[in-house]
Image: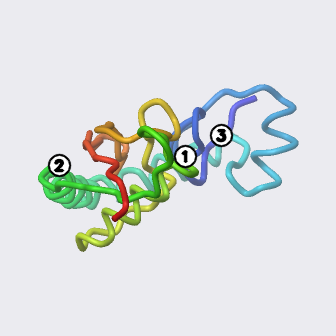
Amino acid sequence: MELILKQDVENVGFKDDIVTVKNGYGRNFLIPQGYAVLATSSAKKVLAENLKQRAFKEAKIVEDATKIAETIKGLEIKIASKVGTGDKLFGSVNNADVAEAIAKSGTEVDRKFIKVVGGTVKRLGKYNASVRLHRTVVADITFEVVAEK
């Protein structure tokens, strides 16, 4: 089943992509949730026209995303967490905590676009995360989990 995505869908595609998915997934999830529409010939023509009009705006968006990526890469992020015996954390540190730490520095990033390498963090130390600011701009950052005083 061919669909045109109305917004970014994880592991499927980005907004305005024409993707092929299994019939049940498209019919029972993507279309009812409003994430996609059927890729009919008329819908494809409308999409092509919209993409032409949006092409020059896209360059400015990519430039802004690149600037944000540079500021994020320069940050030294430390996340304080409660620690038990050894270096084990009470609870864990995930993408929401990283987003909150980035927001404290003055740059807002939606937590959905942050992926902590290895999933959640359960020990003290330095870790990596990737922040997707645009479909072509991904910033890799490092953060440190330290003991709360």
- CA separation in Å, label 1 and label 3: 6 Å
Q: Which residue is mark 2?
A: 73
Residue at the spot 61% in from the left edge and 46% down from the top edge: 5
Residue at the spot 44% in from the left edge and 61% down from the top edge: 110
Q: Amino acid at mark 1?
A: Lys
Residue 71 is situated, as x and y percent measured from the top left of the image, at 15, 58
| Quadrant in which the N terminus is drawn | top right
Residue at the spot 35% in from the left edge and 47% down from the top edge: 131
2 vs 1, front mark: 2
| Quadrant in which the C terminus is drawn | bottom left
- CA separation in Å, label 2 and label 1: 39 Å
Q: Which residue is mark 3?
A: 41
Q: Which residue is mark 1?
A: 45
Q: Amino acid at mark 3?
A: Ser
Q: Is the Cβ of the residue at disc 1 closer than 8 Å to that at disc 3?
A: yes
Q: Is residue 131 visible?
A: yes
**Secondary structure beneath label 3:** helix
